[in-house]
Image (cartoon, helix red, strand yellow):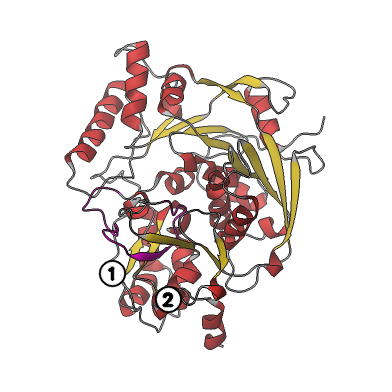
Amino acid sequence: MKATLTEKIMARAANRDSVKPGENIWINVDILLTHDVCGPGTIGVFERELGENAQVWDRNKVVIIPDHYIFTADEKAHRNINILRDFVKRQNLPYYYDPGTRDYQGVCHVALPQLGHVRPGEVIFGTDSHTCTHGALGAFATGIGNTDAGFVLGTGKLLVKVPETLRFNLTGSLPQGVTAKDIILRIIGDIGVDGANYCAMEFLGEAVTSLSIEERMTICNMAIEAGGKNGIMNPDEKALEYVRKRTDKPFEPLFADADAPVAAEYNYDVSEFEPCVAAPHLPSNYKPASQCQDIKIDRAYIGSCTGGKIEDFIMAAQILKGRKVKVPTFLVPATVEVAEGLLTEKVGGKALVEVFAAAECEDIAPPSCAACLGGPIDTFGRTSGNEVVISTTNRNFIGRMGSKDSQIYLASPFTAAASAVNGYISDPRAFFAANI
């Protein structure tokens, strides 16, 4: 029986030969991810229902990566970390990445694959909607609430409805200056923020296989912005190599049948795509960057699980080298690994940190989610008034980055950097032409 990748993974996790969209099935969980925002609530559900002395179902399958409200003086944020520490100590959990120690990693969605916790063919649940990032490595990964996570913590299982699949065939080669962020913003612009409600968004085609793993993560990360249950891609050799470098744990990849029945199929030639933005206040408000040059910006923000990876900063540096920004430009590496890469990776013969310093960007923040989710008042990069911001983050809802009066335009690192240099939303392709 022909099946999509999501259906194959769920069938195996349910110990069944096959499953059908719409079925409610019990599946076994390979990884449960949580962080400082939802971890305390998950722990509360677990201990209330099973007792304070209950043990988690498998201590080696629970990963806790605090990342959201880390570098702050906020007492409630500190309390959440303390709750996590106490629970980890009682449960003797090996995979806790504690802030303030050498174990701290940064943003969970980038750190999880970097640390080898994401493996093709497995089931990953996380108490964060952007857990779907990990479908880029061929896993079924999706966000769940605290109640479901508390149940998983105690049982290692969850009752899940099998989603229908929407297939996105991406062909052609990306033009210079166009990125994975432009791909997913175009798709969300076409189908809307509810266009994939409770569906698996399966991405196939030569344009996908040509992308780096980090760029694939950007696409899968934002499946939730179209209402998707998960985003997922076949784990090709590039993905398998990425995983093998980061873990020696065994795994068995699965692959979609290209002709499996799906709810709908979309075909795109990415060679026709151009740099774009998503205008306030929805990720579906697609506009070509070239048509937004009348929009002045007050700041630029490069960071988050979508835009704070090392390749994102390399893109930004390609625009910023030899130039200076006209607006405050905030830089937040997603993880410690990315922060270290800013010191070693070079563009134009200079380390990225040197490029950003010469461009007069703001001091680079320590790795965390920072202003992507607003955060406490002392959060780095948080908006506090009616700023117009161009950002590499994944959401531009009202109040998302702090002030309810701010306007957030989502964009790729190329477009964000180009806009920072000009002081208004700009098409980065002009900068590449100027470098010739």
Find residue 424 and name its label. 2
Please tell me how crowded label 2 is: few (under 14), some (14-19), or many (20+) other residues with Cα within 10 Å.
many
- Write the residue at 29% across / 59% down: 383
The C terminus lies in which quarter of the figure?
bottom right
Say if 208 sits above or below 43 in the image.
below
Ranked by sequence position, the earlier of labels 2 and 1 is 1
Magenta stretch encompasses residue 393: yes
Indicate the amino acid at tag 1: Glu
Quadrant containing the N terminus in the rendered view: top right
The residue segment tinted magenta is 375-397
Residue 157 percent coordinates (x, y): 53, 20
Q: CA distance from mark 2 to mark 1?
A: 18 Å
Q: Give x and y (percent) for residue 377.
A: 22, 51
Image vertical order of residue 269 relative to residue 404, above or below: below
On screen, residue 60 versus residue 83, left or right, reads right
Secondary structure at numbered mark 1: loop
Q: Is residue 158 above or below residue 267?
A: above
Q: Quadrant of residue 100?
A: top left
Looking at the picture, how far across and down is residue 42, in whole percent?
A: 37, 26
The answer to which quarter of the image holds residue 429 is bottom right
On residue 333, the disc is none
What's the mark number on residue 362?
A: 1
